[in-house]
Image: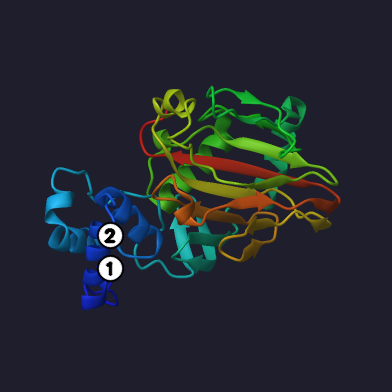
Amino acid sequence: MDSRQAITPELREWLLAQVAAGHRADRVFASMQASGWDSSVALEAIREVMPDVADGLDLEPIAMPDLPGGAGHRVQAHDRQVEVVVGMRQPRIVVLRDLLSGAECDALIELARPRLSRSETVVNRTGGSEVNAARTSQGMFFSRGEGDLVGAIEARIAALLNWPVDRGEGLQVLRYGVGAEYRPHFDYFDPAQPGSQAILKRGGQRVGTVLMYLNTPEAGGATTFPDAGVEVHALRGSAVFFAYEQPSPLTRTLHGGAPVLAGEKWVATKWLRAGRFD
């Protein structure tokens, strides 16, 4: 529990106001988490102030991928020491240096290059995918554990974030040419959309993203988080990790890839799921 957070009279008054407004306990819990409240503190407060509303609801804190507790500026991740450059709590955004070596970046690009095709996005109404003007990159997917290099990267991410390899999707590699971009979006699947239910049957909800930069563009191509006011520049071998406990804009994980202004940008993305992804 975060010692800086306490169940104050002001918090109790706010919770009582939520009850009076007819808000469900699970939505209040999600709102508190997205606003920076520790899960255990939020749960204790809701059960104290809203016992009738909370009764019978599944409000247990959600296990999430993250760096080891108390991690400093260097973390041993399986076979490689990774540097932590910046860490934010709300939203949970961590910028990492040297997650990949230069040689690994080059090798991943060359393995992916002959398999590239126009990137697609998920179609919410069906759960399928299609070409979308909001995403103008080329991309491909490796199957999980495909080859020694991909397997090593997946094991490294699993160790770094304490998240099993089998709870991750296959690695995706993307290439952005001059002018290519990915407009701001969320990575989770909106449960209100009809197509999401079929997707969620395979591994459950996405809960985290690791975006790895395989080269340094000449200009442009930063990863932007508009709701958090954060911009992460693409630097070869570095990465940004961000997590989202709830499939809600309250997580402030809206993000996008700014247009490449000169050269090209190569990235590799690893999406983490709540359950086993087969």
Say which quadrant the C terminus sits in: top left
Is 142 displayed left or right of 164 in the figure?
right
Three-letter code, disc 2: Gln
Q: CA distance from mark 2 to mark 1?
A: 6 Å
Residue 125 in view:
yes
The x, y position of residue 105, in whole percent, is: 68, 46
The x, y position of residue 103, in whole percent, is: 69, 47
The x, y position of residue 239, in whole percent, is: 60, 54
Which residue sits at x=44%, y=65%? Answer: 89
Q: Secondary structure at mark 2?
A: helix
Residue at numbered disc 1: 14
Three-letter code, disc 1: Trp
- Dot 1 crowding, Cα within 10 Å, few <14, some 14–19, many 20+: few
Say which quadrant the N terminus sits in: bottom left
Seen from the viewer's position, the closer of residues 237 and 91 is 91
Dividing the picture into quarters, in which one does residue 269 lie? top right
Q: Are marks 2 and 1 in contact (CB under 8 Å)?
A: yes
Residue at numbered disc 2: 18
Seen from the viewer's position, the closer of residues 98 and 177 is 177
- Dot 2 crowding, Cα within 10 Å, few <14, some 14–19, many 20+: some
The x, y position of residue 141, in whole percent, is: 62, 29
Seen from the viewer's position, the closer of residues 262 and 229 is 229
**Relative to 87, residue 173 above or below:** above
Seen from the viewer's position, the closer of residues 134 and 53 is 53
Which residue sits at x=51%, y=57%? Answer: 252
Is 241 displayed left or right of 224 in the figure?
left
